[in-house]
Amino acid sequence: MTEPRTAPSPAEHTLHRAIGPKLLILFVIGDILGTGIYATTGKVAGKVGGALWLPFAIGFVVAVLTAASYVELVGKYPKAAGAALYTQKAFKTPFLTFIIAFMVMCSGLSSASAAARAFSGDYLGELTGDALPPTLVAITFILLLAALNMRGVSESVKANVVLTLVELTGLVIILAIGAYAVLTGDGEPSRLTEFETGDGTGFALMTGVLGATALGFFAFVGFEDSVNMAEETKDPVRTFPRAIFIGVAVTGTIYVLVALVSSLLVDSGTLEGSSGPLLEVVKAGGVDFPHKLFALIALFAVTNSALINIMMASRLCYGMANERILPRAMGRVLPRRRTPIVGIVFVSLLAIGLVSTGEIEGLGDTTAFLLLCVFAVVNVAVLVLRRDPVEHRHFRAPTVVPVLGAITALILASPLADRPAEVYVRAGVLIAIGIGLWVVNKVVLRARGEE
């Protein structure tokens, strides 16, 4: 007779609460900073021209609106799974829940893939002379980060702290170069109000700014990832509001200032043509700062972005498995390390596929598009879930905030943002993969009589 299976102990499906308030703030800042500002600033300049700062300022406002909705929801439901959990609780439609969860996961993977591509671009070329095959470098990069992630959340978050401080240092250097340029009269202030958006009509100006904002919004993604760490954070109901708002405020201010400096010192054409635009700023700044050292700092910055996104995608798999949106096997953790081993392997394989088929701008825009769609749903979910009060106290956003958050997210996700067709195609393929997985999972559950 076959021995009955022993039910897994609670410890096999719980995560270790290792993240305190200060560590979470650094985590949020490190999650937002990185690839977006270091690699796509030039592409944003190519869409809007010298008024590069404007898309980042608009993106900051949109990010604050949606961040407030996330803070309210993570306070009510401090569990892993983030947007998927909120969607299920609000709409109770398993198919929609799965698609939202899969879109969030794919946005993290496309972001990590953009970071991997940025790692193998001009910043690395400054150090190696373009001697290494970019795609091979990017794939190897993903595999190394997956290995670090398997060691544990404590190791990964501590690495994040170090990398966050390094990437902050790089942006402070840019700001210092900008301050020096202003004091010495260098740079071209007139570029700060120049718009280069097609035929110059009002409609072209609007779509150009929206397109630049949609791509620039890639630089702000990351705060939503932190809610997936709720089960690994000490006292998340009290810790998350401060951490997310401080993180978004700090990064938003830095982004606008860096954009101003970049446009002041380098023309939009030069910025657009480089996969290492901030290196161009250093070279044009009139300050004798070692170019190779800055390139190394930038590599650390994009490494941090990729590390966190791989980490968050694997935690999302873990959360979905516990909610039975994915098979329970996706929630399996290493016995000693307590890390979601199956989730890490799964998302790493998907990231390798993305990094092998996309470039920085397309992958970054795909990330922003997927998350803008998710943000629209999350903002609506906040309003729906006001009918589901909880016993404990938590942050509550003014009603107008999620309303404006949903509207702005939908506008930036729409064709008004002048987004390349390849972004919609890539997103469509990813969603189609998600639908295929959904069907497979439903068949398995029915076969086991668990539906």
Image (spheres, rainbow, N blue to C red):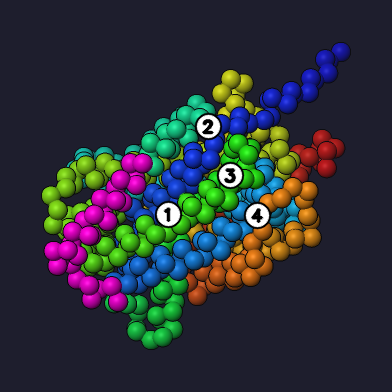
Q: Which residues are magenta?
A: 165-193
- The answer to whether residue 351 is visible is no
| Residue position for label 3 | 239
How many residues crowd around disc 2 within 10 Å: few (fewer than 14), some, or many (20 or more)? Answer: many
Image x and y of residue 449, in percent: 85, 37
Q: What main secondary structure does the magenta stretch of the protein show?
A: helix
| Residue position for label 4 | 395
Amino acid type at mark 1: Val
Q: Using the image, determine if residue 76 lies above or below residue 153.
A: below
- State which mark lies toward you, 3 or 2: 3
In primary-sequence order, the first of circles 3 and 2 is 2
Image x and y of residue 360, in percent: 38, 54
C-alpha span from label 2 to label 4: 27 Å
Please check the rendered image and state whether residue 269 is part of the magenta-colored stretch, yes or no.
no
Q: Using the image, determine if residue 142 lies above or below residue 208.
A: above
- The answer to whether residue 182 is visible is yes
Q: Residue at x 70, y 47 (%)?
A: 77
Q: Residue at x 71, y 34 (%)?
A: 328
| Residue position for label 1 | 250
| Residue position for label 2 | 153
How many residues crowd around disc 1 within 10 Å: few (fewer than 14), some, or many (20 or more)? Answer: some
Question: Which type of secondary structure does the marked residue at label 3 adopt?
Answer: helix
How many residues crowd around disc 4 within 10 Å: few (fewer than 14), some, or many (20 or more)? Answer: some
- State which mark lies toward you, 2 or 1: 1
